[in-house]
Amino acid sequence: MGKIRSTVRLGEVESGQWELDADADAALAGWGQWVAAREGWRSSQSRGAVAVDTNTAWLVERVVYGPAFNPRARAILVAHYVHGTPLIQTCRLFGIAVAAYDHALWRAVEAVRRQLGAGMLCPMA
């Protein structure tokens, strides 16, 4: 049996289809800075300062490092948000086609967003 192939080729995907949810991206960026500072990592890519809500960071931490979370998705999120690993290195490390990176990142972010629920990602006023 051969590999099952998608009927949609990655080059044919509409631009912006894998756009990340803004609240989830902000929560993960804050979590990434929080983890990097906690563990003494310095990001190889400067993302700028993001306001870190420690309560949200803890919630994201519980989801990402939970036993039910996909280990590959966890590794992609850590590489992207904590270490700031360049896209090419991440693709080589995980065997992801460069054209498929946006989709892989989107799936990992969506997994976090679904497990937390949309309401938990919005900062409290």
Image (cartoon, grey):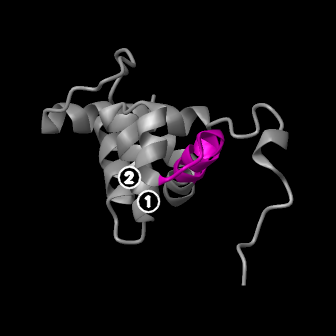
Q: Is residue 110 above or below residue 84?
A: below
User: 64 or 92: nearer the eye?
Assistant: 92
* One can see residue 122 in this view: no
In the rendered structure, which segment of residues is drawn in magenta?
95-110
- The residue under the point 68% across, 35% down is 19
Q: Which residue is mark 2?
A: 75
Q: Which residue is mark 1?
A: 72
Q: Quadrant of the C terminus?
A: top left
Task: Give the percent coordinates (x, y) of residue 23.
Answer: 55, 35
Mark 2: which amino acid?
Ala
* One can see residue 37 in this view: yes
Question: How would you classify the magenta stretch by its main secondary structure?
Answer: helix
Mark 1: which amino acid?
Arg
- The residue under the point 19% across, 32% down is 41
Q: Secondary structure at mark 1?
A: helix
- The residue under the point 34% across, 16% down is 49
